[in-house]
Amino acid sequence: MTGKENNFALIGVAGYIAVRHLQAIKDTGNNLLSALDPFDSVGCIDSYFPRADFFVEFERFDRHIDKLKRVGTRVDYVSICSPNYLHDSHIRFALRQGADAICEKPLVLNPWNLDALGEIEKETGKSIYNILQLRLHPAIIALKKKIDQESPGKVHDIDLSYITSRGNWYRISWKGDIQKSGGVATNIGVHFFDMLTWIFGPVQENIVHVSAANHAGGFLRLEKARVRWFLSIDHNDLPAVVKKRGQRTFRSISMDGEDIEFSDGFADLHTETYKNILEGKGFGLEEARRSIETVYTIRNSTAVGLKGEYHPHLKNIGKDR
């Protein structure tokens, strides 16, 4: 910790993930000066920083932050929880205002955006931090340590399944627009791809078997793993036993046929991320590169269909399971 109270601004405060950032700012003993969101259902602020100024127009928010700077009230960090396609612009805003940026995943949608942001870091002397909270999960840290200690050349078989049902609102929102969200693999999968490439090494082969608005599946050959993956927002893709229980989400990651269990322990990971950032140990631009390159390739690949090492869920799409 820095030992001093830092001033924060937050962009995207009406989003579902923003409350974790509000909690993290409060838990680390810091202060939220100002928040922005075009939607005004932000009463949650009262539980954390009721004196924070709130804006629904970026232009007024911009003017306010500039005014604070001119009267000697410095914004040290800007936390960014806005839609994916706006991250790049909002990071640039933060750095040009003299603040460090803390941004949700995906940091940007395209790999070359990372290079441009790196130049702005150099120009401003400020830093960009990514929220990669799975890297702080005790079970994931233990798994990485185990893999790092194995003999060279050992390769594991990984199956990743993540189905998180979304209603009709999803396709109408920005999340349903691939130009704004990056598509289903980016929007709900980028943190899994970051975790896997962090543990098992860089991508050597990236094949997409199925790619649609509601689901996608493919195969990744990593340095230390062969990964079959399936991601979906379609309730129809849930296994029958999960539907019968009335559940709307199914997540499974197995290694060599054995489940990797990390369902618990998520509650405070944003706060731990903030602590690391405030101590100068946050995850920077280059930490995000592997996952950004992975989902960019998936988004721009032509699906090859059900051949090769495809995920077993794919052959059941459209069937009652």
Image (spheres, helix red, strand yellow):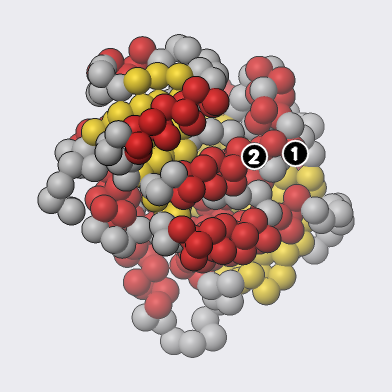
Amino acid type, mark 2: Tyr
Amino acid type, mark 1: Gln
Q: Residue furthest bottom?
A: 152
Left or right of residue 39: residue 281 = left
Q: Secondary structure at mark 2?
A: helix
Mark positioned earlier in the residue sequence (2 or 1): 2
- Residue topped by disc 1: 179
The residue closer to the viewer here, 192 or 90, is 90
The residue closer to the viewer here, 275 or 30, is 30
When the figure is inspected, residue 128 is found, relative to residue 264, above or below; the finding is: below
The residue located at (25%, 18%) in the rendering is 51
The residue located at (54%, 86%) in the rendering is 153
The residues bearing labels 2 and 1 have C-alpha atoms spaced at a distance of 7 Å
- Residue topped by disc 2: 85
Image quadrant where one finds the C terminus: top right
* Residue 138 x/y as whole percent: 29, 56
* Residue 88 x/y as whole percent: 59, 46
